[in-house]
């Protein structure tokens, strides 16, 4: 295999910035021009829509500057939702007519009594709140509103309380992860200067704002640079004069927070309200818009007998595009849409000769939002040669993963499928060639609803077997099932038995011994990959497959070696990380950068 450029191994821990770095000051006020943020927001929104989140509802998360329960900050957004609000009289229609549709959308009632997103008093925004308080209350607010997007500005009270910046960063990251896992697009905001209260706080504001920017960058979520947006306002928009100069709360125009004339935009809440409308408009017009189209290759390049190829499927928020790459050259040889372009739930992929034609075929499966559909495309001509539902067609949570391996010794690979989150942990096996179902069993307790990832391989002392790992919410219990059996023949836990983030799994012979090892990767959080001996459960290797600062986890697959040579492990990025595929040959060593790699796009991919 030709030498590919090496990629640095990242094993250092994630650390917060110890000095008041000020790179956040150069970030734009609105994040609407960042394609990676847009891609990730689309993925989160796609998940949210499958979970029933409302795209006409937002939630506020913050302290007194965001709470309608505070007499000290009455101007934040509330006036925009009150009966009789007049966008013409307020100046909004004249200065920003493009925002009127967004205003109307979010004036939709969300609770009994007609309250809407603007005038509803969020339980996650309250005077004195710190990030820990928001973490404790955001679940209740989501249950009450089913919001699809969250506007978050919190940290002022953490600065004043002397919260350690590292603790603050970790808690803010936890808040982001909690919202994204629930299908809510989190919009972080930098906090305003507190110099009007005491100059001693100003350096800490810079530190905390850098932490906010770092979290937004780590998880590729939108960041409103409120600090910069208010920097030119008198006293940086903080109430520093008048009858009650708090030094903490933002100023509001005498005409109210819903006024947007030139004089009104000399007040902080009015500017912030305008920015909030602009980010909500971005959410409505870009995040919820159809994703960019995937252009299928005009002709199919026939795959050859014995040719090593791998497939990459796009994740949530994208058109269901699949690319096929030659493993030796890294060249993309074929590209096609696995399902109708309107489906954005993600495509799981596997490669194997499942038709008996002697060349690798491409197997695809639909993610959440679609039925549990599996399709097979001929490696010879790209034709759709099989399409079937692995589970009840009414099941709308899709498929977690798909694998292909010759389990019955017929020289034709069989198809193994695991149910997606929301259903029981069902595994189904379909015979290669005619795709008749030959096995179906629960890999874990039937009451578990986190889904199940699957792999298939051949293991010393076991023979052909199916490997399973639980999805989100389950303990990291790896199980092996001999082909034809429904009870696990091996079962072990990975290094952290309390981890419930879910695991991706594949089987690969990384030693060239003729027996596969089990490789698992975290489905969320840092991109940790672990290799295990399937018979003993002993851990053989651990490493980060990408920057330790990444937060979207990984997906794993394999390129099978020829003639007794070791297999190559494939690792693709998770949902909120930059598009990248890494290859690992052997048990350890330096990874190689495979195709695709895209520093401007942040959507999850599936590899196989």
Image: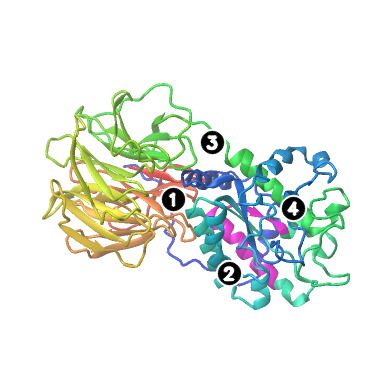
Query: Is residue 132 rendered magenta in the image?
Result: no
Q: Position of residue 493 (x, y in %)?
A: 27, 64
User: For the view shown, which residue lies furthest in the front direction?
Assistant: 113
Q: Position of residue 443 (x, y in %)?
A: 24, 53
Q: Which residues are magenta?
A: 204-226
Colour mode of the rendering: rainbow
Badge 1, how many Cα within 10 Å: few under 14, some, many 20+?
many
Q: CA distance from mark 4 to mark 2?
A: 23 Å
Q: CA distance from mark 2 to mark 3?
A: 36 Å
Numbered label attached to residue 574: 1
Q: Earlier in the sequence, mark 2 or mark 1?
A: 2
Q: Earlier in the sequence, mark 4 or mark 3?
A: 4
Q: CA distance from mark 2 to mark 1?
A: 29 Å
Q: Residue at x 52, y 47 (%)?
A: 53
Residue 60 visible, this angle: yes
Q: Quadrant of the C terminus?
A: top left
The residue lying toward the viewer, choosing from 176 and 73, is 73
Numbered label attached to residue 254: none
- Kind of element beneath mark 4: helix
Q: Residue at x 75, y 67 (%)?
A: 193
Numbered label attached to residue 133: 2
Comparing labels 1 and 3, the label whose residue is closer to the camera:
3
Which residue matches tag 4?
273
Tell me if label 4 and label 1 are in contact, CB under 8 Å.
no
């Amino acid at each position: 295999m030709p030498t590919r450029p090496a990629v640095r191994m990242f094993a250092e821990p994630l650390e917060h910035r110890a000095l008041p770095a000020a790179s956040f000051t150069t970030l734009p006020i609105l994040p609407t021009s960042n394609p990676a943020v847009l891609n990730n927001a689309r993925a989160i929104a796609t998940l949210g829509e499958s979970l029933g989140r409302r795209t006409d509802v937002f939630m506020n998360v913050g302290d007194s500057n965001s709470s309608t329960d505070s007499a000290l900050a009455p101007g934040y957004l509330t006036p925009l939702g009150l009966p009789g609000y007049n966008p013409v009289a307020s100046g909004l229609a004249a200065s920003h007519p493009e925002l009127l549709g967004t205003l109307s959308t979010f004036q939709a009632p969300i609770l009994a009594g007609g309250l809407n997103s603007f005038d509803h008093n969020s339980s996650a925004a309250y005077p004195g709140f710190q990030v820990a308080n928001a973490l404790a209350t955001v679940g209740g607010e989501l249950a009450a509103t089913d919001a699809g997007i969250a506007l978050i500005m919190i940290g002022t009270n953490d600065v004043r309380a002397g919260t350690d910046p590292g603790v603050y960063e970790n808690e803010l990251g936890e808040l982001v992860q909690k919202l994204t896992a629930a299908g809510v697009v989190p919009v972080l905001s930098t906090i305003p200067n507190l110099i009007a209260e005491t100059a001693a706080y100003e350096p800490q504001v810079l530190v905390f704002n850098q932490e906010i920017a770092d979290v937004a960058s780590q998880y590729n979520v939108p960041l409103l640079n409120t600090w910069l947006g208010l920097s030119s306002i008198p006293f940086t928009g903080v109430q520093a004069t008048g009858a009650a100069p708090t030094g903490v709360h933002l100023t509001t125009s005498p005409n109210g927070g819903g006024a947007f004339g030139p004089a009104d935009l000399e007040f902080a809440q009015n500017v912030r309200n305008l920015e909030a409308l602009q980010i909500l408009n971005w959410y409505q017009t870009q995040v919820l818009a159809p994703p960019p189209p995937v252009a299928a290759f005009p002709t199919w390049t026939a795959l050859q007998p014995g040719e090593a190829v791998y497939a990459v499927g796009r994740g949530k928020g994208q058109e269901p595009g699949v690319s096929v790459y030659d493993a030796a050259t890294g060249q993309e040889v074929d590209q096609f849409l696995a399902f109708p372009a309107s489906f954005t739930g993600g495509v799981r992929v596997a490669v194997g000769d499942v038709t008996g034609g002697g060349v690798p075929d491409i197997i695809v499966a639909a993610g959440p939002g679609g039925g549990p559909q599996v399709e097979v495309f001929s490696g010879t001509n790209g034709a759709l040669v099989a399409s079937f539902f692995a589970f009840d067609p009414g099941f709308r949570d899709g498929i977690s993963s798909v694998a292909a391996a010759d389990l019955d010794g017929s020289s034709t690979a069989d198809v193994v499928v695991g149910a997606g989150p929301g259903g029981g942990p069902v595994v189904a096996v379909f015979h290669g060639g005619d795709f008749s179902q030959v096995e179906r069993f629960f890999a874990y307790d039937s009451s578990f609803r986190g889904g199940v990832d699957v792999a298939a391989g051949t293991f010393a002392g076991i023979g052909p077997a199916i490997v399973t790992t639980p999805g989100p919410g389950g303990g990291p219990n790896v199980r092996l099932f001999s082909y034809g059996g429904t009870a696990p023949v091996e079962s072990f836990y990975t290094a952290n038995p309390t981890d419930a983030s879910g695991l991706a799994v594949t089987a690969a012979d990384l030693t060239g011994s003729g027996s596969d090892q089990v490789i698992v990767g975290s489905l969320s959080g840092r991109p940790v990959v672990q290799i295990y001996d399937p018979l003993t459960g002993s851990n053989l290797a651990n490493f980060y497959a990408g920057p330790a600062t990444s937060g979207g986890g990984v997906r794993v697959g394999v390129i099978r070696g020829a003639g007794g040579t070791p297999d190559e492990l494939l690792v693709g990025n998770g949902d909120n990380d930059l598009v990248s595929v890494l290859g690992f040959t052997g048990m350890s060593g330096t990874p190689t950068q495979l195709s695709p790699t895209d520093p401007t796009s942040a959507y999850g991919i599936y590899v196989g």
